[in-house]
Image (cartoon, rainbow, N blue to C red):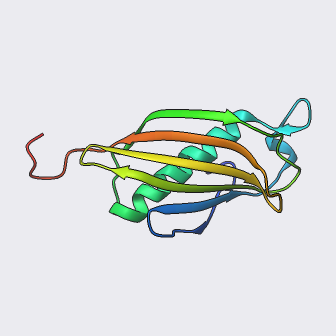
Amino acid sequence: MSEGMGVVVDGLPEDGAVLRVPYSDSLVRPGGTISGPVMMALADAAMYAAILGKLGSVIMAVTANLNIHFLHRPGKSDLIANARILKLGKRLAVCEVALYSAGQPDMVAQVSGSYSLPPAEGSGG
């Protein structure tokens, strides 16, 4: 889904990632706001990018949990995701993501989630 949204990686700071979805009317739901599934997909992609930025290619990493709190209505501007890794274990990565409308100081959504990581090669598990 994130490919169809035009997700752009703006940066990969240590233990994190900054991604952006350019604003498009196709992402807007009835009522004139960016849809929740778009916000969730961007947050999920940002968590995955943060993990890849830290570990390199981990193709079999999968979302284990995603929880989102919608705080404010996003504006008619790009949607920005600032993700950071809170804990990186052998089999689980725990992340948080702050979503913002570009140019606005207030967070539009707060996301927490985790990724299940495949066993390291040679670990036997």
For residue 15, side relative to residue 32 (left or right): left
Q: Residue at x 89, y 51 (%)?
A: 76
| Residue 20 in the image, given as x and y percentages of width and height | 68, 59
| Residue 87 in the image, given as x and y percentages of width and height | 37, 50
For residue 102, side relative to residue 3 (left or right): right
For residue 42, side relative to residue 100 (left or right): left
Name the quarter where the N terminus is drawn: top right
In this view, the residue in front, 47 or 87, is 87
In this view, the residue in front, 85 or 45, is 85
Q: Could one spot residue 1 in this view of the protein?
A: no
Q: Residue at x 79, y 58 (%)?
A: 105
Q: Residue at x 54, y 44 (%)?
A: 44
| Residue 23 in the image, given as x and y percentages of width and height | 81, 54
Q: Splitting the image into 4 quarters, where does residue 31 fall?
A: top right
Q: Could one spot residue 78 in this view of the protein?
A: yes
Q: Splitting the image into 4 quarters, where does residue 54 fall?
A: bottom left
For residue 37, side relative to residue 55 (left or right): right
Name the quarter where the C terminus is drawn: top left
